[in-house]
Image (cartoon, helix red, strand yellow):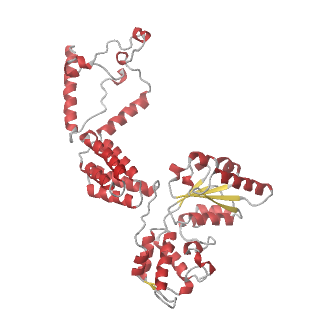
């Protein structure tokens, strides 16, 4: 290995030009969008969205090199508006003196809050900088619309097995930057295991390979010709890191699977998807909030206790903390999955929302308006209102909806669970009210 052996293998093997770049053929292939941008030599401000280890930082550096631009690495974690001002001042001075343009690379740009992102806008618009932001999270949710509209969004994909295999081969044979001087032998099954456990992440692949190689070399006094076996890879990689980002596509795929498993009354699938999310680092509060929503949306009054249990699960988790508190979330998930289901509340509210949007500000019937002043009373506010508790069964034939919506029914309970009782009660009340209307007897 070279004098840079103390630099991580993943950093040493970073591609030096586009010919060395592996993967993202949907962007870099002949006639593809990135090829066109690179050939033109003028880079637009860009958001690179993709999972860890897919090449976002490398592409940003190569873009800058291709455009002969000054590359500034700007961390959203370590830097703020003060540091940005310094970069902008330097970029303006460079342009004024006819120097190189500046590419400002912002890693984890989603970590900037909305106000901080606003600070980029004028300089992107004026062309003072070319902004390249990298994010593992969906830009639609995390990047402010004005900034997003001024950037080209490119979606990177996890690297496939072929791409990872190429990267692994290079790292093993490259004598200048890789581990080629060690003359390693990598068993086929061990290579497959490294590639599989990388989960599409080139950085994870090279880190794991470097660790496994270190274990192999340490067991061989002469230091060369070591064999990397499956057992050494297993030792190096104790646990697979699941691909997951808390606001990106995989996040929504898993929470969708969790929600739909509960809706489909499959507690086993619900538990699996919950376990996947928690193992990958999802915020338990997010899972709890989704269950609380589910309790009203998909269970509703078929089992009113579902909402109570879901809220209690969140409180129990906060009281106990992880990992003990996770069992309360498990209890709620199983309860929801096995509860009778009804979306009648969800549908009812949707119908009411649609009428509210479609019909606008319909007048409140005079008899149920509040009349706190003398003028309001003189105008008829509250006149003729019948106090329900003064009547038998607390039922009175009185209109509560605007006249345009008279007799509109939004809530239609099902025959499932407790909602059957609600349905029977409403049907009984409606019959009583209808009879009293016909006989004019309140």
Q: Is residue 400 left or right of residue 58?
A: left
Quadrant assignment for the C terminus: top left
Q: Is residue 72 left or right of residue 212?
A: right
Between 301 and 438, the one lying in front of the other is 301
- Decide: is 436 above or below 325: above
Q: Is residue 212 left or right of residue 297?
A: right
Between 431 and 277, the one lying in front of the other is 277
Name of the residue lying farthest toward the bottom: 222
Between 216 and 428, the one lying in front of the other is 216
Q: In x, y percent, where is residue 341?
A: 26, 45
Q: In x, y percent, where is residue 210?
A: 50, 77
The residue at 33%/39% (across/down) is: 346
Q: Total of numbered circles in the picture?
A: 0
The residue at 55%/72% (across/down) is: 10
**Can see residue 396?**
no
Q: In x, y percent, where is residue 419?
A: 22, 38
Q: In x, y percent, where is residue 356?
A: 41, 30
Name of the residue lying farthest toward the top: 378
């Amino acid at each position: 290995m070279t004098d840079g052996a103390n630099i991580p293998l993943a950093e040493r093997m970073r591609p030096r030009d586009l010919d060395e770049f592996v993967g993202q053929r949907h962007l870099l292939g002949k006639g593809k969008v990135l090829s066109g941008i690179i050939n033109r030599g003028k880079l637009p401000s860009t958001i690179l969205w993709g999972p860890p280890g897919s090449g976002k930082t490398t592409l940003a550096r190569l873009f800058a090199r291709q455009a002969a631009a000054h590359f500034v690495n700007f961390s959203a974690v370590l830097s703020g508006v003060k540091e940005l001002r310094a970069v902008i001042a330097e970029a303006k001075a460079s342009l004024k003196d006819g120097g190189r343009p500046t590419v400002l690379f912002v890693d984890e740009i989603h970590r900037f809050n909305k106000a901080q992102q606003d600070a980029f806008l004028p300089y992107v618009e004026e062309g003072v900088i070319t902004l390249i932001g990298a994010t593992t999270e969906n830009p639609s949710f995390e990047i402010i619309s004005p900034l997003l509209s001024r950037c080209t969004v490119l979606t990177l994909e996890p690297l496939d097995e072929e791409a990872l295999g190429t990267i692994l081969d290079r790292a093993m044979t490259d004598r200048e930057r890789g581990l080629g001087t060690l003359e390693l032998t990598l068993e086929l099954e061990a290579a497959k295991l490294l590639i599989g456990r990388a989960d599409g992440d080139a950085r994870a692949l090279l880190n794991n390979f470097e660790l496994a190689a270190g274990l192999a070399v340490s067991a061989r006094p002469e230091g060369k010709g070591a064999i990397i076996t499956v057992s050494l890879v297993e030792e190096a990689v104790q646990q697979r890191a699941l691909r997951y980002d808390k606001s990106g596509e995989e996040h929504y795929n898993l929470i969708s699977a969790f929600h739909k498993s509960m809706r489909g009354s499959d507690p086993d699938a619900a538990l699996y998807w919950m376990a996947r999310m928690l193992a990958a680092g999802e915020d338990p509060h997010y899972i709890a909030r989704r269950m609380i929503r589910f309790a009203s949306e998909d269970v509703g009054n078929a089992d009113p206790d579902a909402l109570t249990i879901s809220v209690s699960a969140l409180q129990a988790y906060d009281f106990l903390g992880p990992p003990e508190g996770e069992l309360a979330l498990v209890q709620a998930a199983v309860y929801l999955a096995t509860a009778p289901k009804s979306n009648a509340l969800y549908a009812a509210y949707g119908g009411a929302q649609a009428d509210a949007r479609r019909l606008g500000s319909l007048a409140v019937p005079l008899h149920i308006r509040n009349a706190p002043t003398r003028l309001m009373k003189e105008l008829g506010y509250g006149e003729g209102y019948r106090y329900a508790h003064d009547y038998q069964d607390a039922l009175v034939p009185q209109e509560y909806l605007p006249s345009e919506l008279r007799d509109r029914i939004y809530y239609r309970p099902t025959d499932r669970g407790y909602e059957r009782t609600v349905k029977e009660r409403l049907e009984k009340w409606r019959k009583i009210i209808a009879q009293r209307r016909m006989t004019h007897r309140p």
